[in-house]
Image: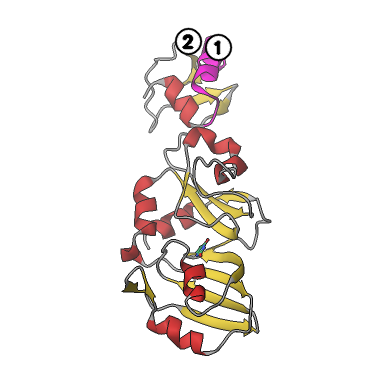
Amino acid sequence: MRLDKFLANSGVGTRSEVKRFIKDKRVKVNGEVVKSDSFNVDETKDVVLFDDLEVKYKEFYYVLLNKPKGYVSAAIDNVYPPVTDLIPEYAFAKLNPVGRLDVDTTGALLLTNDGDLSHKLISPKYHVDKVYEVEVDKKLDSKLVEAFKQGIELDGEPTFPAELIIINDKHAELTLHQGKFHQVKRMFKKFGYNVLSLNRKAFAFLTVNDLKLGEHRELTIEEEQRLKSL
Ligand code: URA
C-alpha cells in the first residue's frame, strides 16, 4: 500500500497533509526517513513512525456512540446534522451507522466501515437483540405483553416475537430481534399509543452505560470478536 494512503487511513492526516509530512521528513519506515509518498509499505510487517511515534494500521474501526437527540443516522441530511458530526476524528475512516435510530431517539448506535459486519448485524437472519426504553402517552395495558410476544402485523407480515416488560404506567422495556423502520413507534401506534421518548439501552451485548449522551468509544478487541461471532 502507498505510504500516503497508509498514513491517511490511519488517521494521521488528510491525503494532502500526509504528503506534506512525508516531504518534511517526519515519516520513517523501518528506521529510515522516506521522502516519497508513493513508497510501498507492507502494513503487516513494516514499522512506520510519524514524528518518531509508531503508526498502527487499522483497516476497520468500530465505534459505539451514545446518540443524543437531534442527529440523523445517515451521512447527509437537509435538516439535521449527521451522527458522524459527533465523531469528527474518524472522518478519515468513513464510518456508517449500523442500522438507524430516529432523530429523536437516543442511545446505543454502532458505527463502522466494516460493511460485511454491518450487513450481517442488520440482517433479519441474525436476530441481533435491541433493547429499548420506551415512554408512552397513556397507561400501558398488560395485554400488550402477549400481543408483542405473538407478533403484530407491520408491512403485511407479523413482527418477530418481542419481549415487553412494563415498568410502570407509562414506561416499558422492549426487546426486539429485528429492525424495521420506526418499528417501536409503529408497534405501539397499532394499539393507540404515541411514543414520547425512546432510548436504545443495548445493541446486541453493547450498552452505553459508561457513556454520556454524545460520547463515544472504540470497541475493545474482545467486543469486536464477540460481535463477529454472533
Ligand atoms: N424504533 C423506532 O420507532 N425508532 C427508532 O429509532 C428505533 C426503533
Instruction: Name the residue rendered at 40%, 67% in the picture.
Output: 178
Relative vertical location of residue 10 with respect to residue 75 in this rendering, above or below: above
Cα separation, mark 1 vs mark 2, equals 6 Å
Decide: marks 1, 2 in contact (CB < 8 A)? yes
Relative image position of residue 210 (x, y in whole percent):
65, 59
Relative image position of residue 176 (x, y in whole percent):
45, 71
Horizontally, is 79 left or right of 146 in the view?
Answer: right
Relative vertical location of residue 165 with respect to residue 43 in this rendering, above or below: below
- For label 1, the crowd category at 10 Å Cα-Cα, with few meaning under 14, some 14 to 19 and many 20 or more, is some
Relative vertical location of residue 146 with respect to residue 41 in this rendering, above or below: below
Q: Residue furthest front?
A: 192
Residue range (magenta): 11-27
| Mark 1 lies on residue | 25
Q: Secondary structure at mark 1?
A: loop
| Mark 2 lies on residue | 35
Instruction: Name the residue rendered at 47%, 73% in the picture.
Output: 187
Relative image position of residue 222 (x, y in whole percent):
47, 56
Q: Amino acid at mark 2?
A: Lys
110 vs 167, nearest the viewer: 167
Q: Does residue 116 appear in this view?
A: yes
Task: Specify which label sits upstream in the sequence, 1 or 2.
Answer: 1
Specify whether residue 18 is painted magenta: yes
